[in-house]
C-alpha cells in the first residue's frame, strides 16, 4: 500500500476553507487589539469579536459546497447547518459576556474572546471533516480552548476545579476515541469515512467474527463521544463544570460543545458505520446501546434536575436530558430522524443560549445563581422575567414555542422508524421521552413560579447592555419563528438528509 498525497487545487481549497481561515486569523486580531488598546476600552475587544463572527457567517455563503484535500474536507448542507449553529453559539456567548469582562476579566479580555473563536474554528473544521484523523484534530481544537475557558476565573476555586475536571475527563474521552479509531482503521485499512462504510460492509460479509471487534470499537467510541455529549454514564462532570465555569462559557459548552459531539457522532456512526447495520437499516449494533444511553439521559437528567437549587446545575442536568431527546432522532435512520436532529439543535441554540444569557445578567447583577433569589423579579423586571419564562417553556416543549416542534420532530422520527421496521423498543424509548418531558415541567416552571407567584417584589432590577439585549431578542425571535413558522428550517433540514448515503434506501 503506497499512500499518495491528495492533489490540491489551491484556489478551490482556499475558497472552501475561507470562513475557517478568516476566523482563525480574526482570533489573533482580537488578541492583538486587546494588547494595543492597553485594555482601557472594556467593549472594543468584544465588539471586534462579534464583528469577526458576523463576517465569518457571510463568508460561509461565499465558500459554498465542495471537496478539498482528497475528500478530507467536505462542505455540504450538513456542515453548513452546523457551522451556522456554531457561529450562532459563539456570537451569543460573546454577546452575553460583556458584563463579566467589565467586572471579572479586566486584564485578559483578548484571550477570553480569542479562545472562544479558536474553539469555534475547531467546531467548524470538525463539521467539514470527512476523515478520522482530521475529525479528531478538529475535536481537540474545539476542546482544548474550553479547558482554559472553564478555569478562566483563576482566583475562584470552583472555576479552577471545573477546569481541572473538564481537562481530566476530556483527556480520558480523547484516549477512548483514539482507541476506538484504531480498531476501525485496523478493520478497514482506511481513515476516510466514506470508504470505511463500504470496507466494513465487505468485511462483515467475509468475516462474521469481526462483530466482536466492532462491538469493542462501538463501545470505546461511544464512551469518548458520550463524554462530549454528557450522556450517562459519562455525564457526572457536567453539573460541576457548568457551575464553576463563567456562565457564558457554560452556555458555550452546553450548546457548542454538545453540537460538536453530535457532529462527531454523525460523522462516525451515520457515515462511517451505517453500512455495518443490517440491510433493513434497523438499529442493531450501536443503535440499541445509544437507545439505552438516551433513555437513561432523559430519566437521570430530568429527575435529578428537580432537586437542584442552583440554576446553572439545573440547566446542566437539563442539557443531559436534552441530549437524550436528540439521540432519538439519531437512532431513526430516516429523513425525519436526520432533519429532526438538525432542527432540534437549531431550536436548542436559541432556547438554551437565551436562558443562559438571562442567568448571566442576573449573576452579574446579584453575584448569585440560586433559584430562590429569582423571587419577585416579575414585579421589578417584567421584561427580563417574561423572556426567561419563554426560554424555560421552550426547553420544556410547550406550544407554540420552538421547543414543542423540536420534540415533536424527534418523537415522530422515532415512531416512524419503529413502525416501518417493527423496532418495538423504539416505541418504549419515545414513551420514556414523553413521560420525562412531563417531569421536566416541574423544574422549568419552578423558576417561573419564583418570579411570578411570590408576594414580595425582588430587590433587584435587571438592566441590559446592547450586546446582551441583542442576544436576547435574537433568541426570542428564533424560538417564536421556529414554533409558529418552522417550514423554512424543515426544508433546509431535509436537504441535510440527502447528503447521507443511506438516504438512497428510503
Image (cartoon, rainbow, N blue to C red):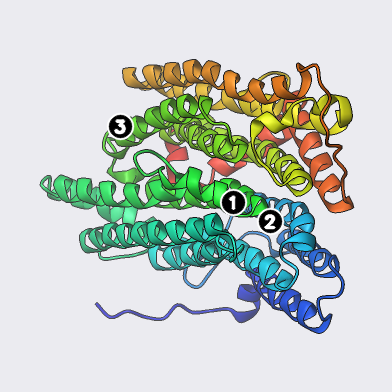
Q: Which residue is mark 3?
A: 288
Identify the residue shown where x is 46% and y is 33%.
Answer: 324
Residue 324 left/right relative to 31: left
Identify the residue shown where x is 41% and y is 40%.
Answer: 231
Q: CA distance from mark 3 to mark 1?
A: 26 Å
Asked if 151 appears above or below 473 in the picture, the reply is below
Mark 1 surroundings within 10 Å by alpha-carbon count, few (fewer than 14), some (14 through 19), many (20 or more): many
Q: Position of residue 140 (x, y in %)?
A: 47, 65
- Element assignment for label 1: helix
Contact, CB < 8 Å: mark 2 with mark 1? yes
23 vs 195, nearest the viewer: 23
Q: Quadrant of the N terminus?
A: bottom left
Q: Quadrant of residue 2?
A: bottom left
Specify which label sits upstream in the sequence, 3 or 1.
Answer: 1
Q: Which residue is mark 1?
A: 256
Q: Position of residue 28 (x, y in %)?
A: 69, 78
Contact, CB < 8 Å: mark 3 with mark 2? no
Q: Is residue 405 visible?
A: no
Specify which label sits upstream in the sequence, 3 or 2.
Answer: 2
Specify which label sits upstream in the sequence, 2 or 1.
Answer: 2
Q: Which residue is mark 2?
A: 90
Mark 3 surroundings within 10 Å by alpha-carbon count, few (fewer than 14), some (14 through 19), many (20 or more): some
Asked if 372 appears above or below 125 in the picture, the reply is above
Q: CA distance from mark 2 to mark 1?
A: 8 Å
Amino acid at each position: 500500500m503506497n499512500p499518495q498525497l491528495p492533489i490540491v487545487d489551491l484556489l478551490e481549497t482556499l475558497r472552501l476553507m475561507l470562513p475557517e481561515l478568516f476566523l482563525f486569523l480574526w482570533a489573533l486580531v482580537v488578541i492583538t487589539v486587546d494588547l494595543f488598546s492597553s485594555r482601557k476600552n472594556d467593549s472594543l475587544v468584544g465588539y471586534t469579536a462579534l464583528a469577526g463572527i458576523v463576517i465569518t457567517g457571510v463568508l460561509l455563503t461565499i465558500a459554498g459546497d465542495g471537496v478539498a484535500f482528497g475528500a478530507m474536507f467536505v462542505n455540504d448542507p450538513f456542515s453548513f447547518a452546523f457551522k451556522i449553529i456554531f457561529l450562532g453559539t459563539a456570537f451569543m456567548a460573546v454577546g452575553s459576556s460583556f458584563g463579566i469582562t467589565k467586572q471579572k476579566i479586566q486584564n485578559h479580555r483578548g484571550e477570553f474572546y480569542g479562545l472562544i473563536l479558536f474553539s469555534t474554528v475547531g467546531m467548524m473544521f470538525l463539521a467539514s471533516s470527512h476523515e478520522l484523523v482530521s475529525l479528531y484534530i478538529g475535536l481537540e481544537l474545539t476542546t482544548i480552548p474550553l479547558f482554559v475557558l472553564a478555569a478562566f476565573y483563576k482566583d475562584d476555586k470552583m472555576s479552577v476545579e471545573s477546569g481541572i475536571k473538564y481537562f481530566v475527563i476530556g483527556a480520558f474521552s480523547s484516549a477512548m476515541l483514539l482507541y476506538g479509531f484504531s480498531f476501525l482503521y485496523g478493520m478497514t485499512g482506511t481513515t476516510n469515512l466514506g470508504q470505511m462504510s463500504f470496507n466494513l460492509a465487505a468485511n462483515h460479509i467475509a468475516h462474521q467474527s469481526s462483530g466482536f471487534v466492532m462491538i469493542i470499537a462501538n463501545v470505546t467510541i461511544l464512551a469518548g463521544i458520550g463524554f462530549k455529549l454528557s450522556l450517562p454514564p459519562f455525564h457526572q462532570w457536567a453539573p460541576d463544570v457548568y457551575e464553576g465555569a463563567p456562565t457564558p462559557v457554560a452556555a458555550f459548552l452546553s450548546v457548542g460543545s454538545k453540537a460538536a459531539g453530535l457532529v462527531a457522532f454523525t460523522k462516525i456512526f451515520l457515515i462511517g458505520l451505517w453500512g455495518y447495520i443490517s440491510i433493513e437499516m434497523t438499529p442493531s449494533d450501536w443503535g440499541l446501546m445509544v437507545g439505552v444511553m438516551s433513555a437513561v439521559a432523559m430519566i437521570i437528567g430530568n429527575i435529578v434536575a428537580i432537586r437542584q437549587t442552583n440554576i446553572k446545575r439545573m440547566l446542566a442536568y437539563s442539557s443531559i436530558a436534552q441530549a437524550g431527546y436528540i439521540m432519538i432522532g439519531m437512532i431513526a435512520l430516516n429523513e425525519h430522524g436526520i432533519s429532526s436532529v438538525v432542527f432540534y439543535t437549531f431550536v436548542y441554540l436559541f432556547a438554551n443560549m437565551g436562558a443562559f444569557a438571562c442567568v448571566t445578567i442576573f449573576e452579574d447583577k446579584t453575584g448569585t445563581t440560586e433559584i430562590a433569589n429569582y423571587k419577585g423579579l416579575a414585579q421589578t423586571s417584567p421584561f427580563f422575567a417574561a423572556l426567561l419564562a419563554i426560554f424555560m417553556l421552550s426547553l420544556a416543549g410547550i406550544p407554540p414555542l420552538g421547543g414543542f416542534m423540536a420534540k415533536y420532530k424527534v418523537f415522530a422520527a422515532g415512531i416512524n422508524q419503529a413502525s416501518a421496521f417493527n423496532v418495538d423498543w423504539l416505541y418504549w424509548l419515545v414513551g420514556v421521552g414523553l413521560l420525562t418531558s412531563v417531569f421536566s415541567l416541574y423544574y422549568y416552571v419552578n423558576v417561573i413560579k419564583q418570579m411570578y407567584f411570590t408576594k414580595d417584589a425582588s430587590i433587584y432590577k435587571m438592566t441590559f447592555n446592547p450586546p446582551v439585549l441583542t442576544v436576547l431578542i435574537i433568541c426570542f425571535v428564533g424560538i417564536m419563528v421556529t414554533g409558529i413558522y418552522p417550514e423554512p428550517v424543515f426544508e433546509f433540514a431535509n436537504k441535510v438528509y440527502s447528503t447521507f448515503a443511506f438516504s438512497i434506501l428510503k
